[in-house]
Image (spheres, rainbow, N blue to C red):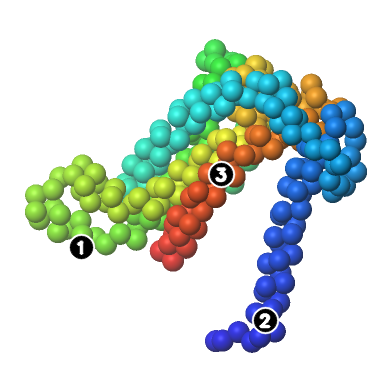
């Protein structure tokens, strides 16, 4: 069915409105960050004399270099391990399909409905019993577990669509189970894996609740989690606070801009396969 000209224009107008609703807050944040420190700018107003030094001051006072290192270490601890476990589990549940795989999959699906807020107190007590409070492990270990429901479901949706004939042909050629996974199915899973890696990176980088509850030292948190301490210290200096917020948002924006085509293509591929 071909859309009419009116429907096309309505769609374009809707997209423009959505873009405006997304871009205007960032423009306001950017313009506010350029005002004189200690002032209270109103709305979207460009300063007569932009204070670009606010970004340098925010970088220094927030110890952005140490926060960046902390976030990178947390990313290294979370993303590779979560990808490995979810890929192996997705391959087992989606392609091998052992006895009870449907029940196990339903348990993972139920895990998606569990909000972080509902388990933050048990997590706090558990990390306290393990002696991991105020360490990066208090963020890394819970995030790996919390990512599993969605990640396993994502990878299962990919592997369940893989042809069984391909596996049968590989077995006839003498491939064992590990070779079947490593040499055949894993290379074909790169689009799904790359998109999942991007999602896990963004979720880890922007993790706020676990960081502020389980880690009291701001320099041991993620950059987003450290924003709470930065806001508490510089909450009255609105331009400096906006400059710090933009510095924290910049890595995720750059990542998405660089990989947006691959990310969108993987999402569309997953929607067609699912």
| Residue 108, visible in the rendered structure | no
How many marks the image carries: the answer is: 3
Q: CA distance from mark 2 to mark 1?
A: 44 Å
The residue furthest front is 49
Considering only vertical position in the picture, is 272 above or below 217? Answer: below
Q: Quadrant of the C terminus?
A: bottom left
Q: Nearer the viewer, residue 258 or 145?
A: 258
Label disc, if present, on residue 165 of the rendered structure: 1
Q: CA distance from mark 2 to mark 3?
A: 33 Å
In the displayed structure image, the side of residue 224 where residue 230 appears, left or right = right
Mark earlier in primary sequence (2, 3): 2
Residue where numbered disc 3 is placed: 254
Mark earlier in primary sequence (3, 1): 1
Mark earlier in primary sequence (2, 1): 2
Q: Nearer the viewer, residue 246 or 183?
A: 246
In the displayed structure image, the side of residue 32 where residue 77 appears, left or right = left
Residue 170 percent coordinates (x, y): 15, 54
Q: CA distance from mark 3 to mark 1?
A: 41 Å
Mark 2: secondary structure: helix
Q: Quadrant of residue 244?
A: top right
Q: Nearer the viewer, mark 3 or mark 1?
A: 3
Q: Nearer the viewer, mark 2 or mark 3?
A: 3
Q: Quadrant of the N terminus?
A: bottom right
Residue where numbered disc 2 is placed: 7
Q: Residues within 10 Å of mark 1 (few under 14, many from 20)?
A: few
Q: Residues within 10 Å of mark 3 (few under 14, many from 20)?
A: few
Mark 3: secondary structure: helix
Mark 1: secondary structure: helix
Residue at the image point whose x is 40% and y is 33% from the top: 81
Residue at the image point whose x is 90% and y is 35% from the top: 40
Residues tagged 2 and 1 counted as in contact (Cβ below 8 A): no
């Amino acid at each position: 069915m071909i859309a009419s000209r009116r429907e096309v224009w309505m769609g374009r107008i809707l997209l423009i409105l959505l873009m405006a609703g997304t871009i205007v807050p960032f423009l306001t944040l950017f313009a506010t960050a350029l005002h004189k420190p200690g002032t209270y700018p109103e709305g979207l107003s460009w300063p007569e004399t932009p204070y670009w030094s606010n970004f340098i001051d925010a970088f220094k006072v927030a110890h952005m270099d140490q926060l960046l290192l902390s976030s990178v270490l947390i990313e290294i601890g979370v993303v590779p391990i979560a990808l490995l476990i979810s890929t192996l589990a997705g391959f087992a549940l989606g392609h091998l399909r052992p006895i009870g795989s449907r029940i196990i999959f339903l348990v993972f699906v139920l895990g998606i409905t569990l909000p972080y807020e509902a388990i933050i107190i048990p997590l706090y007590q558990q990390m306290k019993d393990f002696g991991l409070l105020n360490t990066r492990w208090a963020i890394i270990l819970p995030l790996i577990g919390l990512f599993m429901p969605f990640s396993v479901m994502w990878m299962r949706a990919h592997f369940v669509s893989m042809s069984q004939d391909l596996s049968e042909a590989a077995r006839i050629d003498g491939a064992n189970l590990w070779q079947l996974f490593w040499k055949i199915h894993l290379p074909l899973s790169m689009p799904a894996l790359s998109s999942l890696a991007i999602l896990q990176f963004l979720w880890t980088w922007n993790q706020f609740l676990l960081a502020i509850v389980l880690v009291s030292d701001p320099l041991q948190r993620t950059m987003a989690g450290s924003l709470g301490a930065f806001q508490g210290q510089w909450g009255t200096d609105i331009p400096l606070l906006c400059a710090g917020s933009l510095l924290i948002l910049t890595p995720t924006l750059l990542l998405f801009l660089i990989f947006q085509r691959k990310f969108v293509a993987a999402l569309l591929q997953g929607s067609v396969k699912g």
